[in-house]
Amino acid sequence: MKKYFLFLLLIACGEKKSDAVLAAQDFDAKYKATENAIILDVRTPEEVAGGKIAQAENIVWDDSFADKLSTLEHKPIFVYCGSGIRSAKAAAVLREKGYADVYELDGGIKAWKAEGMPIE
């Protein structure tokens, strides 16, 4: 019985996290509908130079990412990277640091572009 309960608990926790990982269209709609939201690009400056989502702030994902968060207000955060790997790591750190509403772009900017979403 304990194993079954643990299994259900893991599934429930997994479902909650998946609510925070959004496809491009949903990411865009949720961002636009969320008051005072921040969009955060965790790619390198070289990657950002190739195009970014409008109004995105850039804080590079690296070993000192957590130290850079002091400049970021505690507001809802929509985070993305190139493919979703770095942004998932960044989102975990943000949540660990007390940011309550953190949303990830599933597939990163590659998925965003594949959906024909605008970049600047």
Image (tube, rainbow, N blue to C red):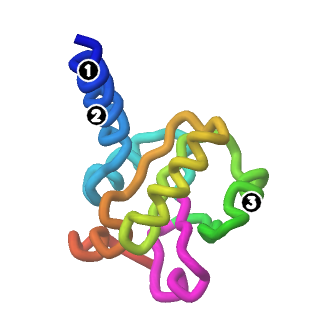
Magenta span has 53?
Answer: yes
| Whole-percent x, y for residue 42 in the image | 55, 67
Q: Residues within 10 Å of mark 2 (few under 14, many from 20)?
A: few
Q: Is residue 40 above or below residue 20?
A: below
Q: Residue at x 60, y 39 (%)?
A: 99
Q: Residue 68: which numbered mark, if any?
A: 3
Q: Residue 116: which numbered mark, if any?
A: none
**Label 1 vs 2, first from the N-terminus:** 1
As shown in the figure, which amino acid type bears the numbered disc 1? Lys
Q: Residue 15: which numbered mark, if any?
A: 2
Instruction: Determine the main secondary structure of the stretch shown in magenta.
Output: loop
Nearer to the camera, 118 or 112: 112
Task: Give the quarter of the figure containing the C terminus.
Answer: bottom left
**Label 3 vs 1, first from the N-terminus:** 1
Farthest top residue?
Answer: 1
As shown in the figure, which amino acid type bears the numbered disc 3? Lys
- Provide the residue span drawn in magenta: 40-54
The residue mark sitting in front, 2 or 3, is 2
As shown in the figure, which amino acid type bears the numbered disc 2? Glu
Among the 4 quarters of the image, the one containing residue 44: bottom right
